[in-house]
Image: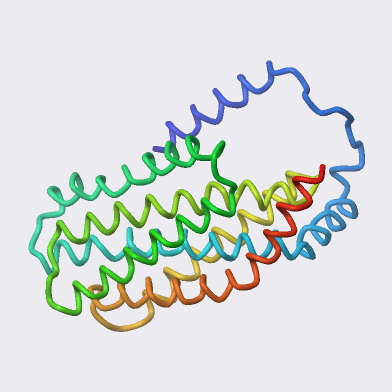
Amino acid sequence: MLLFLADLWADINYSSGSLAETAQELNLQAMHFKQIKTNYAIAIQNKLLLTTTAFFGLAGMCIYIYVSLVPFIAIHNLGFSPQMFGVIGLIPFLGTALGSIFSARLSHRLSAKKLIQLGFLIQLIASVLLALLFYMGWMNLIIIISCGFVFMFGGCLIISNGASIATSTLEDKANASAVMNFINVGMSVCGTFILALIPGSPAIKLPISFLIAMLLMAIIWLNLRHRLNRYDYNLASK
């Protein structure tokens, strides 16, 4: 793996060196610490960037939680071998691929806000359905994989369009992207770490964590939708 990553880095470094410069103007102060600090301060003060990232960060955190807990459920609760689940467990990720295609096709018909709403509705339905089925004792691999597929499909709609909005809120795309990725990855890491410290069965923690995340996303959305309305208005007026 280390050799593969080293070779990949070398290939990217060599290929990028032959690309033409696309920046309209070069800022020679961009690498100065004071300028970097100022740019990050501007990005952190952008409310739309923070709320949008927090919203799709919760969606991404749920995917991390799903990936970390479902193997334990399948192997310890359902009795599947690690080898068998290793193959079957790849199916939900097809939802991410399908979601990206679906999002690209609908981007010309629906706004990013509408696609984010659609993705949240899909994730909410998958979360409630998973919790109800687990509560009624209907826990099997088909339900887990199907809900994971639907959840990742909705998550792709949220994350792809949310990231597009978040990075477009500032002229400095690099710093906007850096702050966005730091919050997004940080939420996922902290969420899975905290969940690992909480005692209990993975079959209980999975649906509960999904429902809590959906509740927090709904609360954030109450604030985010107004900011997105102003964002759409400003975008249309340009």
Q: Position of residue 111 (x, y in %)?
A: 59, 47
Q: Give left or right: position of 224 versus 7.
A: right
- Front residue (pair 197, 170): 170
Q: Give left or right: position of 94 versus 117.
A: left
Q: Quadrant of residue 74?
A: bottom left
In which quadrant is the C terminus drawn?
top right
Q: Position of residue 38 (x, y in %)?
A: 87, 57
Q: Position of residue 122 (x, y in %)?
A: 38, 59
Q: How many marks?
A: 0
Instruction: Report the residue at 71% width, 52% height from top.
Output: 232
In which quadrant is the N terminus drawn?
top left
In the rendered image, the residue lying farthest to the bottom is 199
Q: Give left or right: position of 213 versus 163.
A: left
- Front residue (pair 142, 80): 142
Instruction: Report the residue at 44% width, 54% height from top.
Output: 155
- Front residue (pair 2, 165): 165
Q: Quadrant of residue 203?
A: bottom left
Residue 94 against residue 198 in the figure, above or below: above
Q: Give left or right: position of 70 versus 103.
A: left
Instruction: Report the residue at 74% width, 18% height from top.
Output: 20
